[in-house]
Amino acid sequence: MEKKLSEFTPGERGVVRRIEGEGRVRRRIFDMGVTAGAQIVLRKAAPLGDPLEITVRGYELTLRKSEAACVTMEVAKDA
């Protein structure tokens, strides 16, 4: 099942399928290590939902919700 990273709930994990968006936003997301095939875990969201804290490639990263909306994820199945 695919959904946007911005729609994840804390503790949910998945694999990046594609990055949408254009120009600077897309480049910024790539530069932070969020690329196709990367595994991501949503750690927590701020009280109003923005920003989001994720773990990607072994480090913690904070994304704006608008940036996370550009990331299409394949939701990991629970083991």
Image (cartoon, rainbow, N blue to C red):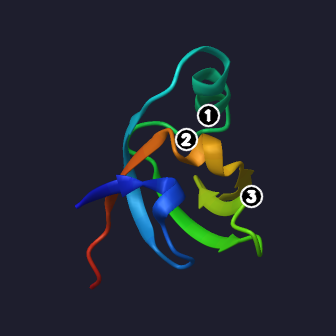
For the residue marked with disc 2, what is the amino acid?
Val
How packed is label 3: few (under 14 Cα within 10 Å), some, or many (20 or more)?
A: some
Q: Could you say where residue 14 lies in the image, as x and y percent from the top left?
A: 39, 62
Label 3, on which residue?
A: 51
- Kindly state the secondary structure of the residue where label 2 is placed: loop
Label 2, on which residue?
A: 34
Query: Which one is earlier in the sequence, the residue at label 1 or at label 3?
Result: 1
For the residue marked with disc 1, what is the amino acid?
Ile
Q: Could you say where residue 69 lies in the image, as x and y percent from the top left?
A: 52, 45
How far apart marks 2 and 1 lie (CA) works out to 6 Å
For the residue marked with disc 3, what is the amino acid?
Pro
Q: Of residues 72 and 14, which is closer to you in this image?
A: 72
Q: Quadrant of the C terminus?
A: bottom left
Q: Residue at x 64, y 26 (%)?
A: 25
Label 1, on which residue?
A: 29
Labels 1 and 3 touching (C-beta < 8 A): no
Labels 3 and 2 touching (C-beta < 8 A): no
- Kindly state the secondary structure of the residue where label 1 is placed: helix
Q: Residue at x 58, y 52 (%)?
A: 57
Q: Quadrant of the N terminus?
A: bottom left
Labels 2 and 1 touching (C-beta < 8 A): yes
Q: Residue at x 60, y 14 (%)?
A: 23
Which residue is outermost to the bottom? 79
How far apart marks 3 and 2 lie (CA) works out to 16 Å
Which residue is outermost to the top? 23
How packed is label 2: few (under 14 Cα within 10 Å), some, or many (20 or more)?
A: many
Query: Which one is earlier in the sequence, the residue at label 3 or at label 2?
Result: 2
Which residue is outermost to the front? 48
